[in-house]
Amino acid sequence: MTKLEELRKKAMALPDAPGVYIMKNARREIIYIGKAKVLKNRVSQYFGSQNNHTEKVRQMVAHVDDFDYVIVGSEFEALVLECSLIKQNKPKYNILLKDDKGYHYVKVTNDSWKMLYDVKQKEDDGARYIGPYTGGESISSAVKQAYDIFMLPHCTKVFPRDIDRAARPCLNYYIKLCAGACKGLVSQEEHNAAVDDAVRFIQGGKTEYLREANRLMQEASDNMEFEKAIRLRDRIRAIEKSSQRQYMVSSNCKNQDVFGVASLGKKTCINVMQFREGTFVNTHTFILDRFENPQEDYAEMIPNFYASAADYPDRICIDLMPLQPEFLEQYFFSQAEKKVTLYVPLSGESKALLETAKKNASEKLARVLSFNDKKNAALIELQEALGLEKLPAYIESYDISNTAGQENVAGMVVFVNGRPLKRCYKRFRIKSFEGQDDYRSLHEVLERRIIEYTKEKEYCTAEGFGRKPDLILLDGGIGQVNAVAPLFKKYNFDVPLFGMVKDGKHRTRAIASGGGEITINDNRTVFSLVSQIQEEVHRYAITYHHTLKKKNTLEVTLTQIDGVGPKRARLLMDRFKTLTAISKAELDDLMSVPGVSAPAAQSVYNYFRKPENR
């Protein structure tokens, strides 16, 4: 009996009850923890057919040597236990959110004159450390803001040692960002009280502090302590002024977290924007393996994010409702002791915030994955938009050009890694029929291309007809795709085939497949790449058509000469390229063209020596 069969047999013996299952490897290490409404059904699925599993699940199952389980009273109890066990054990195959910025602390020194700093590490130095906080940038900003509001010294002076050493206070004193401790303008008690107020401000936020400051200001005014009242008034004004510079929202939900999720290649990025009291206060970014089942992955990721949360929002905005949202909301109520709503905004300000978070996630992911080259990022997004199995690094594109069926030609351009490879461009004259029929023309050209591949593929060429492209794009819609698709089946030419659809103004609008159209206007990166390919293949095909048309026009001019018919006119144009070159050619040069007799050469020579024909 194989290991998989052994595990499936054990799973089939599990009870039909809710619970948590714990997957372990051969070293008895926990590699995955999950919950189930019915343990028997859920766990046995892992050890059945592997074809229906995602790549991540297949990898996990391949490392499972045994599993344990815990039976609980309800599915909600299973969720609570699952979250607790994941937090404790951090299994490899669970979604583990690791913020890219690390932890930060607010440090309050234990000196006689206290000072306030934001630091990345706790030290055994007797200081007070507040935190940890995962949003380093926001904590640094909060500390700087506290320095300005409470007029703490920004300099590196040590007090009381450096009091009265300077001739005059620094600029910060004169612009009311410092109380002037260096000149003895504030006492030690007043300074330390300001530091304590700054700490309360950072911990409690502006709303709580403003409420308390307004009460104290009124109390000082009633007691005729006008200097204290003025100082508090100035702090209140500074806080209100600083708040106006922050990212504010006017949504009916002032306390919300917005989850922006973006996937690129094999990775997914989550950007969480946090708003409290209508003000943007923090952001977190996480890089994970690609979400293959978003609803399931969201259901695991969201409670994981709040496993160590200091506070909970009133609302969580996300672009897709996770599985069993009612259980998540019940779980949050048990942890936060208040209602937390999961919400998918469809319009309005929250929808705009969601799009901002998604944009931040996309840009962060592109930067982390070193996709500084926009072309590479565009190829990845094109792959995802079209559902391709592999990256379309080698793309061929085809277009037809003619004038009322005359000079019927096709152009083929090649893009490698998102850039044109002009040495591999090909031109085709349509040979199988005369007249105008783009469908038949594309059919002929693609069949010739496939036949050339069958001849050259054994040489394994890196470019040219011996290489099978990763993607073929036709300039046209579903009709063009359907005209060519049977060829691919006939020759077993397994290359993805799509059409590039234009609007009424000849601009790229969508990508067509056998099943319909895929809109790309909303994806600027993909839109730009496909538009570039479409414009290039159109330019190349129409340039070839114009060249032939001009050449044929000149050949008609040559047939007016005695002894020169269409065939000799074509031979002369092939040799000399232009009518000017023919008119200046010597008689011996004309006679040297195979197929042009001496009398015909003499006629051409004499014709261009007449003044009216020069």
Image: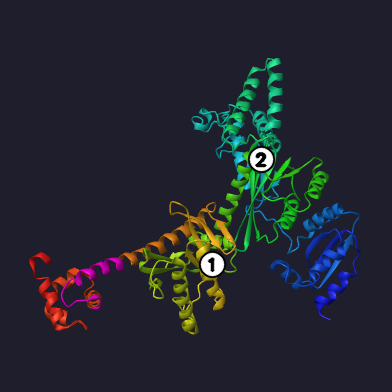
Q: Is residue 392 left or right of residue 23?
A: left
Q: Position of residue 467 (x, y in %)?
A: 48, 77
Mark 1, residue position: 482
**In the visual, does 604 lie left or right of 544?**
left
Disc 1 element: helix
Left or right: residue 27 compared with residue 71: left
Inspect this view and state whether residue 376 appears: no
- Residue drawn 57% across the image and 64% down it: 514
Residue 564 among those drawn in magenta:
yes
Tell me how many marks there are: 2
**x, y percentage for residue 252?**
68, 34
Which residue shows up at 71% across the image and 31% down it?
208
- Judging depth in this view, the residue of 89 and 419 nearest the camera is 419
Q: Amino acid at mark 2?
A: Phe
Q: Earlier in the sequence, mark 1 or mark 2?
A: 2
Residue 236 picture quarter: top right
In front of the other: 65 or 265: 265
Circle 2 SS class: strand
Q: Amino acid at mark 1?
A: Asn
Numbered tag placed on residue 275 in the rendering? 2
Read off the magenta span: 547-567
Which residue lies at the image location 48% right of the left edge and 65% below the top edge? 474
Residue under the point 74% across and 49% down? 306
Q: Residues within 10 Å of mark 1 (few under 14, many from 20)?
A: some
